[in-house]
Amino acid sequence: MTPLARLLVQRIAANGPISLADYMAECLMHPTHGYYSTRDPFGAGGDFITAPEISQMFGELLGLWLAQVWIDQGAPTPFTLAEMGPGRGTCMADALRATRRVPGFHAAMRVHLVETSPTLREVQRQTLAGTAVTWIEDVNALPQAPLFLIANEFFDALPIRQFQRDPAGWCERQVGVIDGQLAFGLSAPAPLATLEHRLADTAPGEIVETCPAAGAIAGHLGAVIARHGGGALIVDYGGWHARGDTFQALRAHTPESPLASPGAADLTAHVDFEALAQAARSQGARVSAMTPQGVFLERLGITARAQTLARGLTGAALESHVAAHRRLTHPQEMGTLCQTIALTPRGVPAPPGLDP
Ligand code: SAH
Protein backbone atom coordinates (compact mmCIF):
# COMPACT_ATOMS: atom_id res chain seq x y z
CA MET A 1 0.00 0.00 0.00
CA THR A 2 1.23 3.51 -0.77
CA PRO A 3 1.47 5.97 2.17
CA LEU A 4 -1.49 7.86 0.73
CA ALA A 5 -3.55 4.63 0.47
CA ARG A 6 -2.99 4.02 4.20
CA LEU A 7 -4.08 7.59 4.98
CA LEU A 8 -7.21 7.34 2.82
CA VAL A 9 -8.21 3.93 4.22
CA GLN A 10 -8.02 5.37 7.76
CA ARG A 11 -9.96 8.47 6.84
CA ILE A 12 -12.69 6.60 4.93
CA ALA A 13 -13.02 3.99 7.70
CA ALA A 14 -13.61 6.85 10.16
CA ASN A 15 -15.72 9.25 8.07
CA GLY A 16 -17.30 7.22 5.29
CA PRO A 17 -16.83 6.97 1.49
CA ILE A 18 -15.54 9.91 -0.57
CA SER A 19 -16.44 11.04 -4.11
CA LEU A 20 -14.13 10.27 -7.04
CA ALA A 21 -13.43 14.01 -7.20
CA ASP A 22 -12.12 14.06 -3.63
CA TYR A 23 -10.13 10.88 -4.27
CA MET A 24 -8.61 12.26 -7.48
CA ALA A 25 -7.74 15.60 -5.88
CA GLU A 26 -5.99 13.84 -2.97
CA CYS A 27 -4.10 11.49 -5.29
CA LEU A 28 -2.84 14.25 -7.58
CA MET A 29 -2.42 17.23 -5.28
CA HIS A 30 -2.09 16.05 -1.64
CA PRO A 31 0.63 18.38 -0.27
CA THR A 32 3.02 15.61 0.81
CA HIS A 33 1.87 12.46 -1.02
CA GLY A 34 0.17 13.82 -4.15
CA TYR A 35 1.35 12.61 -7.54
CA TYR A 36 2.10 16.06 -8.99
CA SER A 37 3.16 17.57 -5.66
CA THR A 38 6.03 15.14 -5.27
CA ARG A 39 7.46 14.34 -8.68
CA ASP A 40 8.28 15.18 -12.26
CA PRO A 41 6.30 12.44 -14.02
CA PHE A 42 7.12 13.10 -17.67
CA GLY A 43 9.21 11.28 -20.22
CA ALA A 44 10.71 7.85 -20.79
CA GLY A 45 11.73 7.35 -17.14
CA GLY A 46 8.38 8.67 -15.89
CA ASP A 47 4.78 7.55 -16.21
CA PHE A 48 3.58 9.23 -19.38
CA ILE A 49 4.74 11.53 -22.15
CA THR A 50 3.01 14.66 -23.40
CA ALA A 51 3.07 16.39 -26.80
CA PRO A 52 5.63 19.10 -25.93
CA GLU A 53 7.95 16.40 -24.54
CA ILE A 54 7.57 14.40 -27.77
CA SER A 55 8.76 17.22 -30.04
CA GLN A 56 9.72 20.90 -29.94
CA MET A 57 7.41 21.39 -32.95
CA PHE A 58 4.32 21.27 -30.71
CA GLY A 59 5.25 24.24 -28.52
CA GLU A 60 6.64 26.18 -31.47
CA LEU A 61 3.39 25.91 -33.42
CA LEU A 62 1.26 26.74 -30.38
CA GLY A 63 3.43 29.81 -29.76
CA LEU A 64 2.98 30.97 -33.34
CA TRP A 65 -0.76 30.33 -33.07
CA LEU A 66 -0.90 32.63 -30.03
CA ALA A 67 1.14 35.30 -31.83
CA GLN A 68 -1.15 35.15 -34.89
CA VAL A 69 -4.28 35.52 -32.76
CA TRP A 70 -2.59 38.43 -30.93
CA ILE A 71 -1.75 40.15 -34.24
CA ASP A 72 -5.29 39.51 -35.56
CA GLN A 73 -6.64 41.43 -32.56
CA GLY A 74 -4.39 44.45 -33.13
CA ALA A 75 -1.42 43.36 -30.98
CA PRO A 76 -2.77 44.63 -27.61
CA THR A 77 -0.11 45.84 -25.18
CA PRO A 78 0.45 44.71 -22.48
CA PHE A 79 -1.12 41.26 -22.56
CA THR A 80 -1.04 38.11 -20.45
CA LEU A 81 0.75 35.13 -21.99
CA ALA A 82 -0.39 32.20 -19.88
CA GLU A 83 -0.21 28.46 -19.65
CA MET A 84 -2.25 26.21 -17.40
CA GLY A 85 -0.48 23.17 -15.94
CA PRO A 86 2.82 23.77 -17.77
CA GLY A 87 4.49 20.53 -16.60
CA ARG A 88 8.21 20.92 -17.19
CA GLY A 89 7.78 24.30 -18.92
CA THR A 90 8.86 22.81 -22.25
CA CYS A 91 5.85 24.00 -24.24
CA MET A 92 6.24 27.58 -22.99
CA ALA A 93 10.01 27.54 -23.67
CA ASP A 94 9.42 26.35 -27.26
CA ALA A 95 6.62 28.90 -27.73
CA LEU A 96 8.86 31.72 -26.49
CA ARG A 97 11.72 30.70 -28.79
CA ALA A 98 9.40 30.52 -31.80
CA THR A 99 7.90 33.97 -31.12
CA ARG A 100 11.18 35.78 -30.43
CA ARG A 101 11.10 37.49 -33.81
CA VAL A 102 7.42 38.48 -33.75
CA PRO A 103 7.74 42.29 -33.47
CA GLY A 104 6.59 43.58 -30.09
CA PHE A 105 5.33 40.23 -28.78
CA HIS A 106 7.94 39.64 -26.08
CA ALA A 107 8.03 43.29 -25.03
CA ALA A 108 4.25 43.27 -24.49
CA MET A 109 3.84 39.87 -22.81
CA ARG A 110 3.43 39.24 -19.08
CA VAL A 111 4.06 35.52 -18.60
CA HIS A 112 1.78 33.79 -16.08
CA LEU A 113 1.90 30.08 -15.25
CA VAL A 114 -1.01 28.43 -13.45
CA GLU A 115 0.60 25.64 -11.44
CA THR A 116 -0.14 24.14 -8.03
CA SER A 117 2.78 21.70 -7.76
CA PRO A 118 5.87 23.15 -5.99
CA THR A 119 8.06 20.46 -7.56
CA LEU A 120 6.97 21.33 -11.09
CA ARG A 121 7.18 25.08 -10.41
CA GLU A 122 10.86 24.55 -9.63
CA VAL A 123 11.39 22.60 -12.87
CA GLN A 124 9.57 25.37 -14.80
CA ARG A 125 11.76 28.02 -13.14
CA GLN A 126 14.84 26.24 -14.45
CA THR A 127 13.44 25.62 -17.94
CA LEU A 128 12.38 29.25 -18.29
CA ALA A 129 15.44 30.86 -16.67
CA GLY A 130 15.90 34.33 -18.17
CA THR A 131 12.16 34.97 -18.60
CA ALA A 132 10.16 36.95 -16.02
CA VAL A 133 7.39 34.62 -14.84
CA THR A 134 4.53 35.04 -12.37
CA TRP A 135 3.22 31.80 -10.89
CA ILE A 136 -0.40 31.65 -9.76
CA GLU A 137 -2.49 28.93 -8.12
CA ASP A 138 -5.63 29.34 -10.15
CA VAL A 139 -7.18 31.20 -13.06
CA ASN A 140 -8.98 33.69 -10.85
CA ALA A 141 -5.59 35.33 -10.20
CA LEU A 142 -5.02 36.05 -13.92
CA PRO A 143 -4.86 39.80 -14.65
CA GLN A 144 -7.96 41.49 -16.08
CA ALA A 145 -6.14 42.09 -19.39
CA PRO A 146 -6.02 40.60 -22.90
CA LEU A 147 -5.34 36.91 -22.32
CA PHE A 148 -3.48 34.56 -24.68
CA LEU A 149 -3.41 31.13 -23.10
CA ILE A 150 -2.61 27.49 -23.76
CA ALA A 151 -3.74 24.46 -21.81
CA ASN A 152 -2.34 21.12 -22.97
CA GLU A 153 -3.30 18.04 -20.97
CA PHE A 154 -4.44 20.24 -18.12
CA PHE A 155 -8.18 19.65 -18.05
CA ASP A 156 -7.80 15.85 -18.02
CA ALA A 157 -6.11 16.10 -14.61
CA LEU A 158 -9.03 17.92 -12.97
CA PRO A 159 -11.15 15.93 -10.51
CA ILE A 160 -14.27 14.31 -11.95
CA ARG A 161 -17.44 12.91 -10.45
CA GLN A 162 -19.21 9.85 -11.83
CA PHE A 163 -22.91 9.06 -11.66
CA GLN A 164 -24.50 5.76 -12.57
CA ARG A 165 -28.04 5.92 -13.84
CA ASP A 166 -30.55 3.94 -11.82
CA PRO A 167 -34.30 3.49 -12.33
CA ALA A 168 -34.75 5.71 -9.23
CA GLY A 169 -32.31 8.49 -10.25
CA TRP A 170 -28.51 8.61 -10.10
CA CYS A 171 -26.03 6.86 -7.81
CA GLU A 172 -22.71 8.64 -7.27
CA ARG A 173 -19.68 6.40 -7.68
CA GLN A 174 -17.57 6.63 -4.54
CA VAL A 175 -14.37 5.29 -3.02
CA GLY A 176 -14.96 3.27 0.16
CA VAL A 177 -13.13 0.58 2.10
CA ILE A 178 -13.83 -3.17 1.94
CA ASP A 179 -11.68 -5.58 4.01
CA GLY A 180 -9.15 -2.84 4.69
CA GLN A 181 -8.70 -2.03 0.97
CA LEU A 182 -9.94 0.86 -1.17
CA ALA A 183 -12.94 -0.21 -3.26
CA PHE A 184 -15.50 1.43 -5.54
CA GLY A 185 -19.07 1.73 -4.29
CA LEU A 186 -22.30 3.56 -5.10
CA SER A 187 -24.36 6.04 -3.12
CA ALA A 188 -28.12 5.54 -2.77
CA PRO A 189 -29.98 6.67 -5.92
CA ALA A 190 -31.49 10.14 -5.99
CA PRO A 191 -32.87 12.36 -8.77
CA LEU A 192 -30.37 15.03 -9.86
CA ALA A 193 -31.52 18.24 -11.53
CA THR A 194 -28.05 18.83 -13.04
CA LEU A 195 -28.25 15.50 -14.91
CA GLU A 196 -31.86 15.84 -16.04
CA HIS A 197 -30.71 16.48 -19.64
CA ARG A 198 -28.78 13.17 -19.67
CA LEU A 199 -31.94 11.09 -19.20
CA ALA A 200 -32.56 11.41 -22.95
CA ASP A 201 -29.29 9.79 -24.05
CA THR A 202 -28.47 7.26 -21.32
CA ALA A 203 -29.99 4.01 -20.10
CA PRO A 204 -30.05 2.60 -16.54
CA GLY A 205 -26.61 1.23 -15.63
CA GLU A 206 -24.72 3.77 -17.77
CA ILE A 207 -22.16 6.12 -16.26
CA VAL A 208 -21.98 9.88 -16.82
CA GLU A 209 -18.96 11.94 -15.77
CA THR A 210 -18.97 15.58 -14.74
CA CYS A 211 -16.02 17.85 -14.01
CA PRO A 212 -17.21 20.82 -11.94
CA ALA A 213 -13.77 22.47 -11.88
CA ALA A 214 -13.42 22.34 -15.68
CA GLY A 215 -16.66 24.23 -16.30
CA ALA A 216 -15.75 26.88 -13.73
CA ILE A 217 -12.30 27.41 -15.28
CA ALA A 218 -13.54 27.49 -18.88
CA GLY A 219 -16.23 29.95 -17.83
CA HIS A 220 -13.67 32.23 -16.22
CA LEU A 221 -11.36 32.10 -19.26
CA GLY A 222 -14.33 32.84 -21.50
CA ALA A 223 -15.30 35.84 -19.37
CA VAL A 224 -11.79 37.38 -19.37
CA ILE A 225 -11.39 36.84 -23.12
CA ALA A 226 -14.84 38.17 -24.00
CA ARG A 227 -14.18 41.28 -21.91
CA HIS A 228 -10.52 42.05 -22.64
CA GLY A 229 -9.75 40.15 -25.84
CA GLY A 230 -7.37 37.27 -26.37
CA GLY A 231 -7.50 33.59 -27.25
CA ALA A 232 -7.29 30.30 -25.37
CA LEU A 233 -6.26 27.05 -26.97
CA ILE A 234 -7.33 23.92 -25.13
CA VAL A 235 -5.78 20.61 -26.21
CA ASP A 236 -6.62 17.33 -24.51
CA TYR A 237 -7.67 13.71 -24.64
CA GLY A 238 -11.43 13.57 -24.90
CA GLY A 239 -14.39 14.25 -27.12
CA TRP A 240 -17.68 16.01 -27.56
CA HIS A 241 -20.37 14.99 -25.03
CA ALA A 242 -19.00 12.78 -22.23
CA ARG A 243 -20.12 9.19 -22.25
CA GLY A 244 -19.22 6.31 -19.98
CA ASP A 245 -16.36 5.67 -17.59
CA THR A 246 -13.04 7.20 -18.71
CA PHE A 247 -11.37 7.38 -15.28
CA GLN A 248 -7.91 5.86 -15.70
CA ALA A 249 -4.51 5.42 -14.07
CA LEU A 250 -1.12 5.22 -15.74
CA ARG A 251 2.09 4.18 -14.00
CA ALA A 252 5.38 3.67 -15.83
CA HIS A 253 3.47 3.91 -19.17
CA THR A 254 1.19 0.99 -18.10
CA PRO A 255 -2.53 1.23 -17.29
CA GLU A 256 -3.63 0.06 -13.83
CA SER A 257 -6.70 0.39 -11.61
CA PRO A 258 -7.15 3.98 -10.39
CA LEU A 259 -7.33 2.53 -6.86
CA ALA A 260 -4.09 0.50 -7.13
CA SER A 261 -1.48 3.05 -6.06
CA PRO A 262 -2.91 6.39 -4.94
CA GLY A 263 -0.33 9.17 -5.17
CA ALA A 264 2.06 7.05 -7.26
CA ALA A 265 0.10 6.82 -10.55
CA ASP A 266 -1.19 9.53 -12.87
CA LEU A 267 -4.98 9.77 -12.83
CA THR A 268 -6.94 11.29 -15.69
CA ALA A 269 -10.38 11.32 -17.27
CA HIS A 270 -11.38 12.31 -20.79
CA VAL A 271 -12.31 15.94 -21.28
CA ASP A 272 -15.89 16.78 -22.23
CA PHE A 273 -15.29 19.60 -24.74
CA GLU A 274 -19.01 20.29 -25.02
CA ALA A 275 -19.12 21.21 -21.32
CA LEU A 276 -16.08 23.52 -21.71
CA ALA A 277 -17.64 25.16 -24.78
CA GLN A 278 -20.98 25.73 -23.06
CA ALA A 279 -19.31 27.28 -20.01
CA ALA A 280 -17.16 29.64 -22.12
CA ARG A 281 -20.07 30.60 -24.39
CA SER A 282 -22.29 31.37 -21.43
CA GLN A 283 -19.71 34.04 -20.46
CA GLY A 284 -19.76 35.66 -23.89
CA ALA A 285 -16.81 34.01 -25.64
CA ARG A 286 -16.89 32.53 -29.13
CA VAL A 287 -15.87 28.87 -29.23
CA SER A 288 -14.48 27.15 -32.34
CA ALA A 289 -15.62 23.70 -33.43
CA MET A 290 -13.69 20.85 -31.86
CA THR A 291 -10.82 19.97 -34.21
CA PRO A 292 -8.53 16.91 -34.04
CA GLN A 293 -4.97 17.72 -32.91
CA GLY A 294 -3.50 16.14 -36.06
CA VAL A 295 -5.63 18.28 -38.37
CA PHE A 296 -4.88 21.39 -36.34
CA LEU A 297 -1.10 20.84 -36.41
CA GLU A 298 -1.12 20.03 -40.14
CA ARG A 299 -2.98 23.27 -40.89
CA LEU A 300 -0.42 25.20 -38.84
CA GLY A 301 2.34 23.72 -41.02
CA ILE A 302 3.87 20.96 -38.91
CA THR A 303 4.96 19.02 -42.00
CA ALA A 304 6.98 21.92 -43.39
CA ARG A 305 8.54 22.49 -39.97
CA ALA A 306 9.31 18.76 -39.66
CA GLN A 307 11.07 18.78 -43.03
CA THR A 308 13.19 21.79 -42.07
CA LEU A 309 14.26 20.16 -38.81
CA ALA A 310 14.91 16.82 -40.56
CA ARG A 311 17.60 18.42 -42.73
CA GLY A 312 19.88 18.74 -39.71
CA LEU A 313 19.38 15.15 -38.53
CA THR A 314 20.72 11.68 -39.40
CA GLY A 315 20.46 8.12 -38.05
CA ALA A 316 18.60 7.50 -34.80
CA ALA A 317 17.89 11.21 -34.26
CA LEU A 318 16.19 11.43 -37.66
CA GLU A 319 14.18 8.27 -37.00
CA SER A 320 12.95 9.56 -33.66
CA HIS A 321 12.06 12.93 -35.24
CA VAL A 322 9.98 11.20 -37.94
CA ALA A 323 8.31 9.04 -35.26
CA ALA A 324 7.51 12.15 -33.18
CA HIS A 325 5.82 13.87 -36.14
CA ARG A 326 3.73 10.76 -36.72
CA ARG A 327 2.86 10.37 -33.06
CA LEU A 328 1.57 13.93 -32.79
CA THR A 329 -0.50 13.86 -35.97
CA HIS A 330 -1.43 10.32 -37.02
CA PRO A 331 -5.13 9.47 -36.67
CA GLN A 332 -4.29 6.26 -34.81
CA GLU A 333 -2.06 8.11 -32.35
CA MET A 334 -2.51 11.51 -30.71
CA GLY A 335 -3.83 12.92 -33.99
CA THR A 336 -7.45 12.13 -33.15
CA LEU A 337 -7.22 10.98 -29.52
CA CYS A 338 -6.35 14.57 -28.69
CA GLN A 339 -8.77 17.31 -29.67
CA THR A 340 -8.58 21.09 -29.64
CA ILE A 341 -10.94 24.02 -29.19
CA ALA A 342 -10.23 27.74 -29.13
CA LEU A 343 -11.97 30.52 -27.19
CA THR A 344 -11.87 34.03 -28.65
CA PRO A 345 -14.01 37.16 -28.33
CA ARG A 346 -16.94 37.45 -30.72
CA GLY A 347 -16.34 39.55 -33.81
CA VAL A 348 -12.59 38.97 -34.31
CA PRO A 349 -11.01 36.90 -37.12
CA ALA A 350 -11.44 33.13 -36.64
CA PRO A 351 -8.27 31.66 -35.13
CA PRO A 352 -6.01 29.69 -37.51
CA GLY A 353 -6.08 25.89 -37.72
CA LEU A 354 -9.46 25.22 -36.13
CA ASP A 355 -12.76 24.38 -37.79
CA PRO A 356 -15.06 27.39 -37.36
N1 SAH B 1 1.00 20.79 -20.06
C1 SAH B 1 2.11 19.95 -19.65
C2 SAH B 1 1.80 19.11 -18.42
C3 SAH B 1 0.53 18.31 -18.36
S1 SAH B 1 0.37 17.41 -16.85
C4 SAH B 1 2.57 19.11 -20.80
O1 SAH B 1 1.88 19.06 -21.81
O2 SAH B 1 3.63 18.51 -20.71
C5 SAH B 1 -0.73 18.40 -15.89
C6 SAH B 1 -0.14 19.67 -15.33
O3 SAH B 1 -1.18 20.39 -14.66
C7 SAH B 1 0.97 19.52 -14.29
O4 SAH B 1 1.86 20.60 -14.45
C8 SAH B 1 0.20 19.61 -12.98
O5 SAH B 1 1.00 19.93 -11.87
C9 SAH B 1 -0.80 20.69 -13.31
N2 SAH B 1 -2.04 20.69 -12.55
C10 SAH B 1 -2.87 19.65 -12.32
N3 SAH B 1 -3.98 20.03 -11.65
C11 SAH B 1 -3.85 21.36 -11.47
C12 SAH B 1 -4.68 22.35 -10.84
N4 SAH B 1 -5.83 22.04 -10.28
N5 SAH B 1 -4.25 23.64 -10.85
C13 SAH B 1 -3.08 23.97 -11.43
N6 SAH B 1 -2.25 23.07 -12.02
C14 SAH B 1 -2.63 21.79 -12.04
Image (cartoon, grey):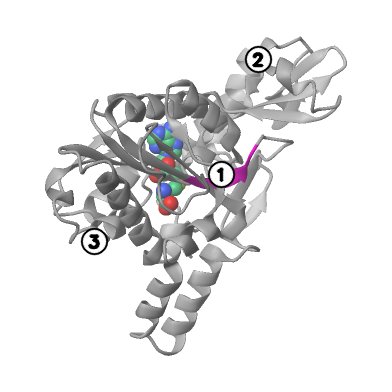
Q: Left or right: where does residue 114 sit relative to residue 22?
A: left
Percent x, y for residue 76?
19, 39
Is residue 126 within the magenta segment?
no
- Element marked by disc 2: helix
How far is mark 2 from mark 3, CA to CA?
44 Å
Q: Residue at x 68, y 40 (%)?
A: 246
Is residue 236 within the magenta segment?
yes
Depth order, front residue of 5/113: 113
Residue 194's disc number: 2
Is most of the magenta stretch helix, strand or loop? strand
Percent x, y for residue 90?
33, 57
Q: Residue at x 30, y 51 (%)?
A: 68
Name the quadrant of the N terminus.
top right
Task: Name the residue tied to disc 1.
Answer: 290
User: Can you say whether 189 is above or below 173 in the image?
Assistant: above
How far is mark 1 from mark 3, CA to CA?
27 Å
Q: Left or right: where does residue 111 sit relative to residue 308?
A: left
Task: Name the residue tied to disc 3.
Answer: 97
Q: Left or right: where does residue 10 sit relative to residue 321?
A: right
Depth order, front residue of 335/27: 335
In contact (CB < 8 Å): disc 2 and disc 1: no
Residue 35's disc number: none
- What is the three-letter code of the residue carrying label 3? Arg
How many labels, in total? 3
Instruction: Please state the quadrant of the image where ligand 1 appears.
Output: top left
Q: Which residues are magenta?
A: 235-240
Q: Earlier in the sequence, mark 1 or mark 3?
A: 3
Based on the displayed image, in which of its 4 quarters is residue 126 positioned?
bottom left
**CA neighbours of label 3 inside 10 A, class few (<14), some (14 to 19), many (20+):** some
Q: Earlier in the sequence, mark 2 or mark 3?
A: 3
Based on the displayed image, in which of its 4 quarters is residue 29 positioned?
top left
